[in-house]
Image (cartoon, rainbow, N blue to C red):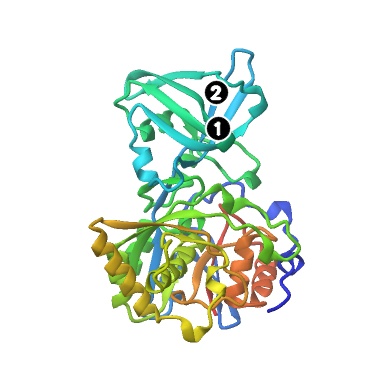
Amino acid sequence: MSDLTLHQFQYDLPDERIARFPLPQRDQSKLLVYKSGAIQHRQFVSLPDELPADSLLVFNNTKVIPARVHFQRASGAVIELFLLNPAPADRLVTEAMDDRGSSVWECMIGNRKRWKDGETLTRRFWVDGRETELTVSWHDAGQSQVCFRWTPADESFAAILHEAGKIPLPPYLKREAEEADKETYQTVYSRIEGAVAAPTAGLHFTPAVLDDLAAKGFKTDYLTLHVGAGTFQPIKTTDVRQHLMHTEQVVYTEENLRTLLAHDGPVIPVGTTSMRSLESLYWFGVRLLKGEADVVHLNQEYAYQFAEADLPTVKEALEAMLADLRASGKPHLVRHTGIYIVPGYRYRLCNGIVTNFHQPGSTLIVLIASLIGEGWREVYEEALKKEYRFLSYGDSSLLLP
């Protein structure tokens, strides 16, 4: 596909189709099933009946952190810190969440001009029955890095955030987070703290659906990609390929690699973050096999520069990653992916996707178009006609090319 203009990935999304709140029961959402061009309408609870035989579902078990923290200056001005990632950028997010006494983070800063150089901001609140003081000061203003310090210093940064911070709902919901969002904006299987946005395709799963999957013999696996704020960044370039894709931290375990190597059947990621993680896994293996100097970062152009004859098999790439993990002596591999999946991309591991309905003109729509081609437009038109609920708290789809 030589012409990839932003106009090709736009559609009209009426405001009333955006789900501002979740349904009372997660698995009662609608499920649009797209199989080889045919569309059917189901309820999400019936997902196990719609999956291809012998499917492996891969979930992202990241957990959303209360990444919005507010401080008030003596003048009354409110400064909002939106945590993006710990400093340095290659640091494992879970390590930073366990910091004691202090932690440095890159942040987006609301009302930044009001926060003076050298000024320390302070808040006091209670954590586990103890009065706690949290202060912030500039660590490196040029890099938007802020140092958080707190006493008592034996509390973890995660515990501090859970009292001081708010869940960062997507901006298109146009409302403040409520107490209920602390539970409803997490998947039931979320475990590893570090995301600033939920992997929303997973919000529909309930213990009952997961039990039904197991009872019907479907395999499941969990990896970790910490969803960043860049996931909401709209495409502003006329040619969508010129968009600067965001990078996110992903963690692979030995179990991930062994499960994929042993599996003989369709691999269905739950959500675009799981899909990015799985496809990136192949390309990280390619970097290893080609003996490249940097094997931990993947930029958005990397997957498009090789002739097919010059590439290893999926099995070879996965085996290279497994060997690298075992040689490292660590329980996991930490990587940073900026993969950008656009029409023309050849999928290596994924055979379909469970996903929500995404914003017009977004990188996520571009990804869906790369999987099912122009069928994406028919899917979205049908969902609008049948009054599906859209975006993070909206309904779901199973897309099988």
Residue carrying label 2: 71
| 160 on left or right of 165 | left
Total number of numbered labels?
2
Q: Nearer the viewer, residue 243 or 167?
A: 243
Nearer to us in this view, 176 or 326: 326
Most extreme residue toward the top, as rendered? 74
Residue 376 location, quadrant = bottom right
Residue 218 seen in this snapshot: no
- Can you give x and y, in whole percent of width and height, for residue 345 in the image? 57, 75
Read off the residue under disc 1: 81
Camera-nearest residue between 254 and 186? 254
Q: Which amino acid type is marked by label 1? A: Leu
Secondary element at image label 1: strand
Callout 2, which amino acid? Phe
x and y, in percent, of residue 231 in the image: 57, 53
Residue 50 image label: none
Circle 2: element type: strand
Pointer 2 and pointer 1: residues touching (CB < 8 Å)?
Answer: yes
Residue name at image x 34 percent, y 65 percent: 221
The relative height of residue 152 versus residue 215 in the rendered view (above or below) is: above
> Circle 1: is it few (<14), some (14-19), or many (20+) Cα within 10 Å?
many
| Residue 121 position within the rendered picture, expressed as x and y whole percent measured from the top left | 52, 19
Looking at the rendered image, the quarter that the C terminus falls into is bottom right
> Left or right: where does residue 12 sit relative to residue 319?
right
**Between discs 2 and 1, the one toward the N terminus:** 2
**Residue 257 shows up from this direction:** yes
Measure the alpha-carbon separation of dots 2 and 1.
8 Å
> Measuring 53% from the left and 78% from the top, which residue is drawn there?
306
Residue 81 placement (x, y as % from top left): 55, 32
> For the point 60% across and 33% down, which residue is it?
109
Question: Residue at left 51%, top 48%?
Answer: 197
Assign the N terminus to one quadrant of the image: bottom right
